Structures are given as structure tokens and as C-alpha cells.
Amino acid sequence: MSYMFILDKRKCVGCSACAVACMDQNDIDVTAGDRPFRQCFTLESGPNPEDKMTFMSLACMHCEDAPCIQACPSGCLKKDPETGFTIYDNTNCIGCHSCAMACPFAAPSYNKEGKMEKCDGCLTRVRHGLEPACVRICPFGALQLVEKEEYENNLRKKAAELIVYSSLKN
Amino acid sequence: MSEDVKELLRAKIPCEKTGIEIRHSVCDICTPGPQCGLDVYVKDGKVIKIEGTKGFGPNNGALCTKGAANRQYLYRKDRIQHPMKRVGPRGSDEFEPITWEEAFRLIAEGLNSVKEKYGADAVAFMTGYPKWYRPWLHRLAFSFGTENYMTESSTCHTAEVMSYLLAFGNEMSADVPGGPDLLVGWSANHMISGFPNGRNFFNYMEKGGKVVNIDTRVTPNEQKADIMITIKSGTDGYLANTIASILIKNDWIDKEFIDNYVHGFEEYKAMVSEYTVEECEQITGVPAEKITELARLIGEAKNPLIMPSNGLCHHINGLQTHRAVVALNILKGSVARKGGMNPSYGSWLEMNAGFVTKEEEFLNDVRPKGNKPRIGTDRFPVWTELKDEGQLMDFVRQAESGDPYPLKAIYGHGVNTMIHPQSDKFVEAAKQMEFIAATDIFWTEFCSLADVVLPACTSMERSEVKANGNGCIFYSSPAVEPLYESKDDVTIMAGVAKALNLNDDLLKSGYDACIKHIFRETPVDLDQAKAAAKQVPVERVQRDPFLSKPLKTPSGKIELYSEVIAKYAASHNLDPLPKWYSGFGEESPEEFPFTLVSGGRQANAIHSHLHKVPWLRSLRPEVMADINPLDAARLNIEQGDEVYLSSATNKIKVKANLSAIALLGQVNLYHGYEEANVNLLLPNTFLDPYSGFPGFKQLRCNIEKAEVES
């Protein structure tokens, strides 16, 4: 069954709980300059109170035809057939940053050994019936992991209020 | 190790193969308030991950930004490891480790020596965060022989409680889930602070409820509201009274309710009749059409809920402002009904869980007699009348002057020098003490001032009983052993009580015995609750409808005209009606053209105790003042520039963050940073005469770009 990350824009407040959950799950060492695989942003559209602020949580989009997969000369990246997540094995990563250059969202980052790391959708947790750490923590249920079918049946009609992280061609 | 197990360990999957176990605890970072349940992932006695507990009352699986960092909070590098005694001059960081026995002995000697020379009232018992041990510290003060027990709530929440006590004789809370037909959040920032309340907002909006939000900062609550009103800091009381005047003029009020239950309506009506929309626009900065629209919305609503927050009280006109906002609910009869302002009866540690305990008796059984007046009594009599604590904000004055009696020692848990306006004056006063004992989880400036420092542990290393708003209790067990030589605060207080040889066997007997005593008539089996390691429901007590008998106010009615304040009207120049007055000090607006708004909540911090948690600090690493981009452009300040914020009292250097969260002419700075403590800018006389609260959110200041050193 294939999954999609969905962010309900109405409910995201940009609090970064998801980012901290990602740090906790993945033992991110921020003191060494590492950053979590998911981060929050607040975009301000102007200096006046009425000017819209957009609150957003962003990570790897798990694109269906992910450009990073094609870009990697070492074949580190692939789609997980079961979940649809873009996953990786960085054993053979040569640290060439080709994936980062191909990614429109700057999702890949590089660890102390220079090897690529990124959000894997908490694949192992999901396989064991647990939500991704970021989804589990979200105070307002703004960030969700939904089955493709659930999206098609119930959420597509609300697409204007959502940020749909995926590949599904809307 | 097989690849499979390696991956399970990397992903921290709790199962037999990994040996990772989930233990249940509570988050105590912002309590009391949400009191969220934690799933603590433990491997080989160490916490490796935290999640919210599913099905747990307030949080149901989720956590906020702060709670998400509980693991790094627990393992912060500056945890105090051992009991310590000072070997250098007071205020130096020269300490050496000692045994617990020696620490208790030194504390007993220090406190008893001051008691013998000056009397028990010369010792101030003080606490900051957390709050779970407060009844024990209060009892320790009483058993020692003084009522001088003070908390950080002297600057945070108590003024809001006072406002409710003055009007209703009882604490109140806003019943958002009950479904008002209009919700006006007034300085509500619940999407960032206390998220279960933020969830109530979202649930309400999802059901089609209409939300107006009024604030002086552009928070997510503001942005998500149907109608956003931004207002100049500290002018909310003027707006509330203007709205009241329009409601009364248009007969948009519940006359029957007022006739039956309200005291002082005629005086109040006369007072608000002087408020005009024109002047309101000028003072508050809210456009006239928005003022009249808000009045019409409230006026035409049948069951509107006007929900104030703590922030309204953080002004020198704060208590009157809060009262003015609460009054709108009274005019509309939105009291003691579904979706209105409802009585909140603290079951345990201020949480309304529907049952009763012997918490008050736990104190009253040992209340000392014949004491001198509590700290702050002469200066803040309304506080003293309503709150069974000293007003901490008068500590420095009394310590410096010895008026009306000397203060010579501090026994503190979690005491934070930075909460004091002009914090440097508090430090100076502390240096003059003859003895100080400090207990904390992390080393603070206050620890450096102490004679003896004791290491406390976090909620994950101890047991405690929490009451939750869903009518349950949760009796936690330690998820891991206390780190280093740390102990929980109540065990420490029992040790101190023994060393002092107090005549209080219950206090000496420790947490479990005390909690059983306090809950002895509450219908719950505490042993079973502890063994269950989950929330246990407790039968609710049936209460008479709130308005069916006289209220605990002097008139027995809901008081728009406060008879408590009236007693001190002449002596302290106070007004029994919630009349607005300016919350600025006397500084010149030409010299200090900006308004400093501090003390707000940001998602990644609460007060000072998370600034040194690396995960949270990484979200906003610099100490930054939010400055409106238009003000910044005028001053030639760019993002990240160093700027000086100056007041008539002091000057600090911070970085500029250009953001529309700050209104034009206002600058917002979060508090609790050691390297740029905003409270150094506030004069320590800048206090609300009603509550004693500092004017955190309305100080005249200036912004100057710092010279770049070449």
C-alpha cells in the first residue's frame, strides 16, 4: 500500500515540534551543525498584521519520479515498493552531492562522513505499524501520513487546503 | 548482530529483539497546565526517545515542541550532579561536592541560625519551575514557622486568578469545547503555548465556530482567526470598556442576568459611558469600524465567550485590564453555562479534575500563628487578601530596607534571578543574605549565590500524581533512575525537614505517604493507580449550580464593582471599577519611542529553562528582538544586525529579527536569556499596584543599531 505525507495548511502553526521529533528519532547532533530531515518555516508576505503568514513543515517530498534517484551515480536511492517512500542505502555514497543538486527541495543533507542522509519516511517504524515520528508528535494533527486510497477518497476534494507531499500527479 | 536487529535498533523499535521498552511518565516542562503523558523509550536504563502517550487526557499521542525535547532536557550537560557547598565568596562559582548528610546539616544550621537571630519570618521560601512540589515547599515554610512562601506565579498567572476571584469569588475557565456562538480570544496564544487549548480552537473552528482574536503580537492564533484585531500593547482595557459602553447603549446585554447576579452594574455603566469609539481608536490603534464591528458581533451573539489570557496581566494596568475583559462575559450572561466562563475548582495542583482532595488541609494543619505580615502585604494588600503567598516582587525592597522587618535567608527550589525586573538588584539583595540554599535541576545564577546547592531530578526520574482535566489521575513511576546523585524535590524537602528537626512527621515521611494523606478521602486506590501506569478515572463530586447560592465575594454576587478593592481604594489609590489607565511608566516617548513587549511565549522555549537544550536552541539560536520591517527600514537595520535595546534603566545588545509579528512602534523580545536578559531593562518599581505584577509588555524603550567594530 502506498502512502502520502499531507500537511493541512490551516492547522500548521510552524511550531517545529515535527522537527524536534525528527531530531530525537534520528539522534541529530545540532551542535555539530547537523539539521533534522524535516524543518518548519514561517513565510511572511508583508510588514502589516493583515499580511498573510504561511506556516509550513517541509521534508523530502518522496516524489514519485524522484530526480535524486536518477542523479545518484552510485545507485544509493530507490523507491520502496511497499510504501512509496524514497529510501536510500548510503553505503556506496561517494558524497558527490548530485542528489542534492537534482532535488528541487534541498532535501538531502550530508553527515560527518560526507555521506547523504535524508528523511526515509521512518520506513521501519511504518513497517512496524507506527507513524513517522513527525506525524506522531504533531500537536494539531496537521501533518499526516495517509494511504493513497484514503487521499483519493476523502482528501483530494480538500486539496486546496493541503500541501500534498508526493508524487501523485494531482 | 543481524542486519535486521541493527535496523530495528536504529529505528528504535520497541520489542524483544531490541530490548527497548516503553515506560510511561509525564512531561513537567510547562506544568501545571497540559500535563501531557510521555512514552519514554528506554534501553539499558537510558532514555533513547520520547513520544506522547496515545489516549492520555490532554495530549493524546502528541507533544509540543518543548515536550518533544524531553530527552535532551533530561541529559542537559549542565545538570547539577552532586550536593555542593560554596567555598569561595558569595556569588563566586567556587563550590565543592559534599555528601547529602552534610548538605542537610549545613542547611539546618544556616536556616536555624537566622531563625534564632531574627525569627522564622526572616527566611523566604521561594520557588520557580517546576510546580509539582509546591504544596510541600509551602508546608515546609509553615512548619518552619513562616508564611513567607513565594512563587514565580507572582509575575505569571496569579493576577489572572485574582481577577476571577475579585469578580466571581472563584477561579474560572473558558469553556471553549462547550461551543459558544462566538469566541473572542484576547491575547490568546494557545497554538504556541499550551497546545491542548489550541486544539480546542481548531476543533471549534472546524465545527464552523467564529473566532475573533485580539493581540498585540501577530501570533498563529491571530493569523488563523476569522477576524484578527491587533492592538497597541496595554490598551486592551480601553477597548474592552468601549465595547461595554456600546453593548449597554444598544441594549445588547443580558439584563435579567445582571439584575439577578451582578453587583455594581450602575456604577460600572456610568464609568464605561465615558468611553468613546473615537478616543478608543486613538488610544488602541484599532480602527473605529473594527471596534464597532467587534461590539456588534459580541452584541448580537447569544452566547459569546470572551477569553482572556495571562498576558493581559503583564502590565502595570494588567489586573484592571483583565477585569475589564472579563466584564464583557458578565454583561452577556456568559457565566456558568455551556460555552461560557465556568467555575474551575482545583482538585490537585490547580487542575480541575472534578474531584476533591485535602490539599488545603495539608497546609492549614501546620499553618503558623502570630506571624508578621507576609512579604508585600503593605504594598499590595489586594494580593495579600486573595493569595496565600507573599508577593515576590516586594522581596528586594524589603530585603534592602528591612521594612517592616529584616529578610536574611532564602530557601529556594528552581529560583530564577531573571524573573525579577532589574534582576541585578535581586542578585545584590541575595548577596546580602546570611544564608541561601538552592535546589535545581540545572546550574543557574541563583545557585552561584547559594551556600549549599542540591541536585534535583526531572519528572522522568521520579514518581508523582497528576490530576488531569478529563477527570483522571496519573501516578507515574520513574522511567529511569535519577541521574548522578540527584533526588526529587519532595525527598529533598523531607531530608531538610528531618535535619531541621521540625515537628512534622508527615512532611518527613516523603511523597508517597503525603499523597496518600492528601487523597485519603478521594475515591481512588493510589497503589492500584501507580501499578496501572496509566490514567485512572476518579468519580466526580456533584456540585450545586454555581449561581444557585451566594458567591464567595463580599457581596455574594458577581462583582463589577469590587468590594475587596474598595477597602483599599483610599489608602492605595485603587479603583473598585475596572477603569483603564495608561500602562506606561513616566519615561519620555520622545527619548524612548518604542514599546518593549516581553514575556511572550515562543514555541521552542518556556521562560529560561529550555534555552540550553541544543535541539530547541537550534530553532532560534540567537537572542533576537522582533522589529517590524518598516521600523527597521527607517532605522537602517537589517536582518541579523546587532542592536541595542535601551530603557531608562539599562541597555542590552541583541540581534534584529525583522518580522511582522511586531507591530509598528513595538519591539518584541523573549525572556530568560542569560546573555541578554530583557528584565534588566525594567525598573523594579514598575509594578501593577493591584497585583504587584511587572509591566513586562509595555516598557518605553529605544532601538539603536550597534556600531560595527572595525
Image (tube, rainbow, N blue to C red):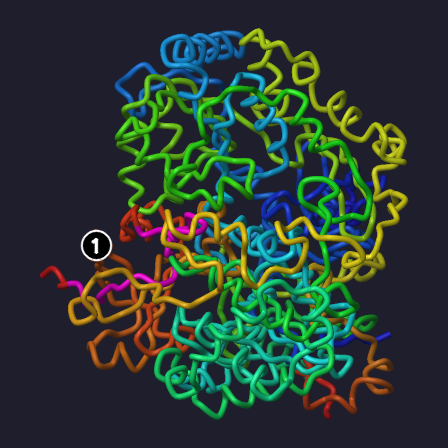
Work out whether residue B308 or residue B376 is closer to the camera in this orientation and state it. Answer: B376
Range of magenta residues: B686-706
Q: Dot 1 falls on which chain? A: B
Q: Secondary structure at mark 1?
A: strand
Q: Position of residue B57 (x, y in %)?
A: 79, 53
Residue situated in front as seen by the camera: B272 or A127? B272
Query: Is residue B633 among the parts visible in the rendering?
Result: yes
Residue drawn at point x = 85 percent, y = 80 percent:
A150
- Residue found at x 87% / y 47%: B540
- Quadrant where the N terminus of chain A sits is bottom right
Residue A117 in view, yes or no: no
Q: Is residue A96 left or right of residue B260?
A: left
Image quarter hosting the C terminus of chain A: bottom right
- Residue pictured at 37% horizontal, 14% vertical: B118
Residue B406, by quadrant, is top left
Q: Is residue A159 left or right of residue B119?
A: right
Tell how many labels: 1
Along the line of sight, which residue is nearer the eye, A123 or B260?
A: B260
Q: Give left or right: position of B597 versus A165.
A: left
Q: Residues within 10 Å of mark 1 (few under 14, many from 20)?
A: some
Residue B529 picture location, percent across and down: 86, 35
| Image point (37%, 61%), residue name | B669
**Residue behind mark 1:** B651
Quadrant housing residue A168: bottom right
